[in-house]
C-alpha cells in the first residue's frame, strides 16, 4: 500500500473487502477480539464473526465499537472522508464533503463529528521540557459591539445586545504550544487561575520554560516553571526569546478555519473542532498516508447520533 493522494487511496481501496481486511489488520493485528465481552475465541462467519464465549455468543464485525458502527456508508467512503478531513489545513465543511463524496449533508455532518471523536487525543503527553512553550487565550465567535476592542476585554455583561440582535457570548479558548512541537487546546468558561492554571499543570512538565503575555492569571507560573512574559499592553511583542508568536500564528489558522469553513460553532461542539485543529497541527510532519494510518488506529470509539444531537 502506498498512497499520496485521494485517487491513489480510492484505487487501493477499490473493493469493500479490501477495506475490511485492512481495517481488521489495523484494529486486531490478525487476532479478532469480541467487542462485546473481550473474548479472543471467535468463529469466522460469512458476514463477520461470532463470539465463542457461551455467555456472550454475539455476532460482530470489525466495525462494532468503532466510529464506523451503525453507518450505512461503506468503509471506502469513510476512508476517503478521513483522508479529506485530515488533509485540508483549515478543515472541510459538511456541505463540501457531501458534494465531494456523493453523500447527503446530514450524513457528512455526522461523519465529520465521528472523525473529530477519533482525532481526540486519548492519552496526551506532557509538553515542554527542552522545548520552549507558549501559552495564551483567545476568543472565538461572539456578536457584540466590543468584538474588535482587543482580546483582553473579557468582562462582558451577558445582557448586552447589539442593535436589537440577541447577544451571542464569545467562547474562550486557552492554548499551549511548543515552539517545535505539539499544541493542546481547551474551551474554558473564563480566564481564571482555576481553569487556566490546572490546564497548564496538567499538560506542561514542571521546570519547563513558558512564555505568555502579561495577564495576571500567569503570575503563578514562576512557582513551577521558568516563566517570562511580553508586555502587549505597552506594545512590546518580542524580546529575544520572549514572545507568543507561535501560538498567535496558530490562532490565526484556527480562526480562519472556524470562521471561513464552519462559520458558527456552538458551545456544545467547540471542543470537537478544537480536537480537529490540534490533531491536524500535531501531525503536520507526517505524510498523508502516515497520518491516515495513525488516526485509523484511534478509531475505536463510538459516538452515537443520539449523543451527538442531545440538547445540552
Ligand atoms: Zn463475546
Image: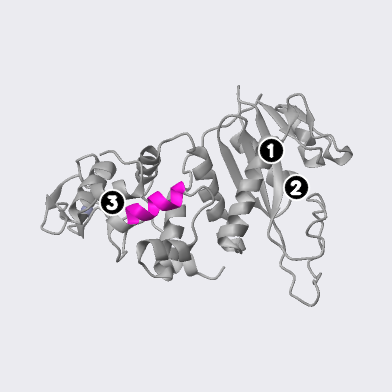
Please tell me whether residue 248 is drawn above or below residue 93 in the rendered image.
Answer: above
Does any atom of ligand 1 lie closer than 8 Å to the CB of label 3?
A: no
Residue at the top extreme?
A: 130
Residue at x 60%, y 58% (from the top left corner): 260
Tag 2 secondary structure: loop
Magenta run includes residue 85: yes
**Which residue is nearer to you in this view: 189 or 183?**
183
- Within 8 Å of ligand 1, the CB of disc 2? no
Q: Position of residue 87 (x, y in %)?
A: 45, 47
**Magenta part of the protein: which range?**
78-87
Q: Secondary structure at mark 3?
A: helix
Q: Nearer the viewer, residue 307 or 278?
A: 278
Residue found at x 79% / y 77%: 164
Could you say where residue 170 lies in the image, as x and y percent from the top left? 71, 60
Residue labelled with disc 2: 192
Q: Is residue 142 left or right of residue 46?
A: right
- Helix, strand or loop under label 1: strand
Q: Residues within 10 Å of mark 3 (few under 14, many from 20)?
A: some
Question: What crowding class fits label 1: few (fewer than 14 Cα within 10 Å), some (14-19), or many (20 or more)?
Answer: many
Residue designated by label 3: 10
Query: For the C terminus, which image quadrant?
Result: bottom right
Residue lying at the far bottom of the rendered structure: 164
Q: Does residue 214 show up magenta in the picture?
A: no
Residue that carries the numbered disc 1 in the rendered image? 135
Do the numbered discs 2 and 3 sit on residues whose CB atoms are within 8 Å? Answer: no
- Of callouts 2 and 3, which one flags the residue occurring earlier in the amino acid sequence? 3
Q: Nearer the viewer, mark 2 or mark 3?
A: 3
Q: Position of residue 185 (x, y in %)?
A: 60, 45
Q: Is residue 204 visible?
A: yes
Nearer the observer: mark 1 or 2; the answer is 1
Amino acid at each position: 500500500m502506498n498512497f499520496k493522494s485521494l485517487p491513489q487511496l480510492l484505487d487501493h481501496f477499490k473493493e469493500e473487502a479490501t477495506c475490511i481486511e485492512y481495517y481488521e489488520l489495523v484494529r486486531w493485528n490478525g487476532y479478532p477480539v469480541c467487542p462485546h465481552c473481550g473474548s479472543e475465541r471467535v468463529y469466522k462467519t460469512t458476514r463477520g464473526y461470532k463470539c465463542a464465549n457461551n455467555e456472550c455468543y454475539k455476532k460482530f464485525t470489525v466495525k462494532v465499537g468503532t466510529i464506523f458502527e451503525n453507518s450505512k456508508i461503506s468503509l471506502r467512503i469513510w476512508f476517503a472522508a478521513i483522508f479529506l478531513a485530515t488533509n485540508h489545513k483549515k478543515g472541510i465543511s459538511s456541505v463540501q464533503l457531501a458534494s465531494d463524496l456523493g453523500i447527503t449533508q446530514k450524513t457528512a455532518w455526522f461523519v465529520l463529528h465521528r472523525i473529530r471523536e477519533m482525532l481526540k487525543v486519548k492519552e496526551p503527553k506532557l509538553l515542554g521540557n527542552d522545548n520552549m512553550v507558549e501559552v495564551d487565550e483567545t476568543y472565538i465567535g461572539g456578536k457584540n459591539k466590543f468584538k474588535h476592542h482587543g482580546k483582553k476585554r473579557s468582562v462582558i455583561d451577558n445582557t448586552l445586545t447589539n442593535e436589537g440582535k440577541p447577544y451571542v457570548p464569545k467562547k474562550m479558548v486557552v492554548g499551549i504550544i511548543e515552539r517545535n512541537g505539539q499544541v493542546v487546546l481547551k474551551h474554558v468558561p473564563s480566564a481564571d487561575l482555576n481553569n487556566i492554571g490546572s490546564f497548564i499543570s496538567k499538560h506542561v512538565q514542571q521546570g519547563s520554560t513558558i512564555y505568555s503575555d502579561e495577564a495576571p492569571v500567569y503570575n503563578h507560573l514562576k512557582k513551577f516553571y521558568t516563566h517570562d512574559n511580553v508586555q502587549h499592553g505597552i506594545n512590546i511583542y518580542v524580546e529575544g526569546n520572549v514572545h507568543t508568536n507561535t501560538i498567535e500564528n496558530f490562532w490565526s489558522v484556527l480562526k480562519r478555519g472556524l470562521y471561513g469553513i464552519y462559520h458558527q460553532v456552538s458551545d456544545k461542539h467547540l471542543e470537537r473542532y478544537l480536537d480537529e485543529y490540534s490533531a491536524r497541527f500535531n501531525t503536520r510532519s507526517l505524510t498523508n498516508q502516515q497520518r491516515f494510518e495513525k488516526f485509523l488506529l484511534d478509531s475505536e470509539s463510538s459516538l452515537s447520533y443520539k449523543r451527538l444531537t442531545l440538547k445540552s
